[in-house]
Image (cartoon, rainbow, N blue to C red):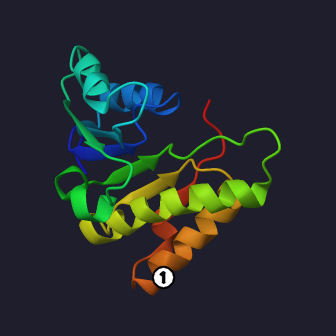
Amino acid sequence: KKEGSFKVCVCGGAGGIGQPLCMLMAQNPHVSELCVFDLTLAMVPAAGVAADLSHLERKSKVTGYALDKDDKPVDKLQECLTGCHLVLVPAGMPRKPGMTRADLLGVNAGIAKNIVEACAKFCPDAVLGLIVNPVNSVVPAMCELYKKAGLDPRKICGVTSLD
């Protein structure tokens, strides 16, 4: 891809990790289009993050997308995901006191699954960077989902370091 021609989506883009990640993507000279997706129940609306990023000097097109908690990404994110080259997923909930890794996996694997299914449908050639804990369990499960769909599981990566 030539400079300035990448479409990137950040799923969970209005969260504590997603917002700075969106800013980095919007400032990247390779990114021409950035989609910020999050749930309507997020503390900050995805459209607000997109509006803030539109003021950056680097001129990538930034659009916000929001879904209700019960909406399925595979039904609602066609415009957002179609044509994406990279999908970053800082989504899910953090581990709370008293919560086991199995509890966390039960919640976050479902969140990742919904997003990965939508990516399989709308941007099957994109690289997916999953920042969803527990990463060492979520990533292999999502790779299996991609294999079953006849897609390349090597397109799914786990992100374990953010700095």
Query: Can I make out residue 34 in this image?
Result: no
Name, please, the residue furthest toward the front.
70
Camera-nearest residue between 31 and 9: 9
Q: Position of residue 155 (x, y in %)?
A: 46, 66
Residue name at image x 28 percent, y 22 percent: 48
Task: From the image, tell me which residue sits under label 1.
Answer: 147
Residue name at image x 36 percent, y 55 percent: 70
Mark 1: few/some/many CA within 10 Å (<14, 14-19, 20+) = few
Q: Position of residue 25 (x, y in %)?
A: 36, 33
Residue name at image x 27 percent, y 54 percent: 84
Query: Can I make out residue 17 in this image?
Result: yes
Camera-nearest residue between 33 and 149: 149
Residue name at image x 20 percent, y 59 percent: 78
Left or right side of 47 for 152: right
Camera-nearest residue between 133 and 55: 133
The amino acid beneath tag 1 is: Lys
Q: From the viewer's perspective, is residue 101 above or below residue 162? A: below
Image quadrant where residue 45 sits: top left
Q: From the viewer's perspective, is residue 113 above or below residue 19? A: below
Q: Position of residue 10 (x, y in %)?
A: 38, 42
Left or right side of 97 for 41: left
